Amino acid sequence: MTNPPRTLFNAVVCLQCGHAMPADLHAGACARCGGAWLDARYDYASLPADWPARVAARPAGMWRYAELLPFGDGLPPVTLGEGGTPLTRSERLGHDLGYRELWIKDERQQPTGSFKDRQAAATVSALRELGVDELVLASTGNAAAAYAAFCARAGIKLWVFLTSSVPAEKMRELALYGAEVVKITGTYDQAKQVAADFAAERGVWLDRGAKAVPGKESMKTIAFEIAEQLGWRAPDWYVQAVSGGIGPLGVLKGFEELHRVGLIDRVPKLAVVQSAGCAPMVRAWERGDAVATPVQPDTLITVLATGDPGFAYEILKRANDRDGGAMVAVGDGAAFRAMRRLARTEGFSVEPAVSVAFAGLEQLIADGHIDPDASVVVNCSGHTFSAEKHALEDRYVLHLDVPVPSSEPAHTSEGFVAALRQLDEQVTTVVVIDDNPNDSRLICRLLRHHRNYRVFEAHNGPDGIDLVRQRRPDLVVLDLNLPEMDGFKILDRLKSDPRTRRIPVMIVSAKSLEPEERALLEDRTTSIWQKGNFSAAEMVKHVVGMLGGALDQPDKPLTTTPRRIADGVLEAFGDLDRRRILVVDGNALDARLLRRLLEARHRFDVVEAHSGAQALADLDRAAPDLVIMDLALPDIDGEDLLADLRNRDETRRVPVIVVATHDPAPPLRARLAAQADSVWSKETLDRSSLLAHVETILE
Ligand SMILES: Cc1ncc(COP(=O)(O)O)c(C=O)c1O
Ligand SMILES: [Zn+2]
């Protein structure tokens, strides 16, 4: 019996400064220059001489090239049958265009219909192994569909940021897979910026596209398959429609590696085809520029709408200077004509982005770039799946207007921050589980009326538990009297599942409680409300106070302090292995942002206190390992709270980080610094430095 194949991945190299680092699938930045463009390297000399035969004996699909992929032996892939797509020889189109040997790499036959499935399979597999359970992605459409499907399969919650020009059918497809879809009115480059900021604010993993190791490496398998399908031979040309460039970068690298190990005799020339309305690479190449100038996209072909290709162009330009190749732009009209021609001559229905590649092919031969005797492979993706509107829940797309001046897409302006805050409110999610539709509708309406929260309803226990698992809401509102599975049982289920254990639950029920029942609930819920016994305004105030309101409505003091919230602390601190952090901040929204940032490290349990009194109670009860506090609190001056902490025996040695809303004046800063471990200001806060500092303290 032969041993399982082992990866030969042995280093990560920074493409910007050449610095070599240890092999790490998740490397995020160069240790020397901070550059984000990283590249995997392998021990090519150890590739077995009979590699093609070994590969041929393995199951079809992209994972069969294991030696030249960066995944460890222990990585069980999240798979939907990706890769291993046919290479189909053109019967009639090639002849019509005057080519002798035209091949179509039929990536339509991937799980979600595009070559992005390779990237999604690789990236999601790697993230699942790392334990990541939430991911943010900006996409022009196809990567989103691919990631949504693979994330669904891996149980990873996905946030997708798209521009509003992405067709509604595509958004519905994503929603069907359970992804959270955020629609941005703005360019794709702006959507990327919003997604990055959203991910940083919430402390959620951000997909790094072509810069990261797993995605680009997965794209090499297109080259490996083509070479293998041609009998370990390279075509003369490889043609691809290009937006961000991960496809051509990966494919090129795959061919370069095969050339390096002697399996093919040359690296194919690469034809980069862009839509004329968004062709920054082509324009730069035509001018002979080493760096691309960003453009404002103006094309119907939204999948290809990357206006700023950045460093990807520089890499492709260098390859182009070395191996030959071409870059061409085609108009939308030419693309749609090519689409009809391909469908009629070959029976291939393709999406607009791919028709761009075929229109490019026509132009390349007309311009004399490609010789008619050359062998040519075109990457072909395909079908746009459409989901029925009525199969989806209400509000499956969140809409965000980004008032960023388009001339400076990279600049984070005030309006931008406001938009993010607005988004934070929109993504604040509540699930109401109540079998009485009138009651649940009333609660939903009340909450939606006061805040732009997303509220979902379920009318029985199993549906409710499903909904909570899928949506991971910020709050569950639970009734007790439900048929079949009652509220106590639902609560049991939620509290025993690690995915839902820490989501606050609030009881709103008509049931009159026995003292033991009440005691049981009080330990595990934030508050208990007796139907008919409270005013709607009071309840909404409580919820808003707990979840945090928008910044323009500073938290008003609650008329009834949510008494039980503090008692939920022990429950939240259930995981004794983790370090515990108490976040004290009078602004509930800031507290929540900080909590999410810390929680994303997966090493900390975090509890929020929104007042000095609550902080003191939590300190007694939960003995945190670190306190992070603001100075502005509703009931006590933060400086006094700090002094109090330092004076009490139990808390004297607990490290404290002050994160003040406004930069403290020098005398105050000096007084604080004498008592706290460090003093930061929210105005100038660098989140990653703060996190690094927290990690050092809790080491
Ligand atoms: C069919 C198709 N072609 C080309 C592209 C461009 O991709 P890249 O990011 O590799 O430039 C995409 C991107 O989604 C695509 O879906
Ligand atoms: Zn570097």
Image: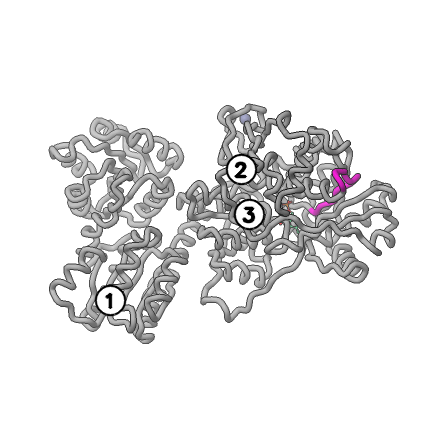
**From the viewer's perspective, is 548 left or right of 137?**
left
- Quadrant (top left, top right, bottom left, bottom right) of the C terminus: top left
Q: Position of residue 328 (x, y in %)?
A: 76, 44
Characterize the local packing of mark 1: few (<14), some (14-19) or many (20 or more) Cα atoms within 10 angstroms.
many
Mark 2 or 3, nearer chain start: 2
Q: What span is colored magenta in the figure?
A: 231-241
Characterize the local packing of mark 2: few (<14), some (14-19) or many (20 or more) Cα atoms within 10 angstroms.
many
Amino acid type assigned to the residue bearing label 3 in the image: Ala
Please give the name of the residue rendered at 67% of the width and 47% of the height, measured from the top-left corner: 278
* Element on which disc 3 rests: helix
Mark 2 or 1, nearer chain start: 2
Dot label at residue 71: 2
Nearer to us: label 2 or label 1 = 2
* Element on which disc 1 rests: strand
Q: CA distance from mark 1 to mark 3?
A: 41 Å
**From the viewer's perspective, is 298 left or right of 622?**
right
Amino acid type assigned to the residue bearing label 2 in the image: Phe
> Does the CB distance between marks 1 and 3 fall below 8 Å?
no
Q: Which residue is mark 1?
A: 508
Q: Position of residue 553 (x, y in %)?
A: 32, 55
Please give the name of the residue rendered at 29% of the width and 68% of the height, measured from the top-left corner: 485
Q: Is 249 located above or below residue 99 in the figure? A: above
Q: Can see residue 286?
A: no
Dot label at residue 120: 3
Please give the name of the residue rendered at 87% of the width and 44% of the height, measured from the top-left corner: 372
Quadrant of residue 132 in the image? top left
* Element on which disc 2 rests: loop
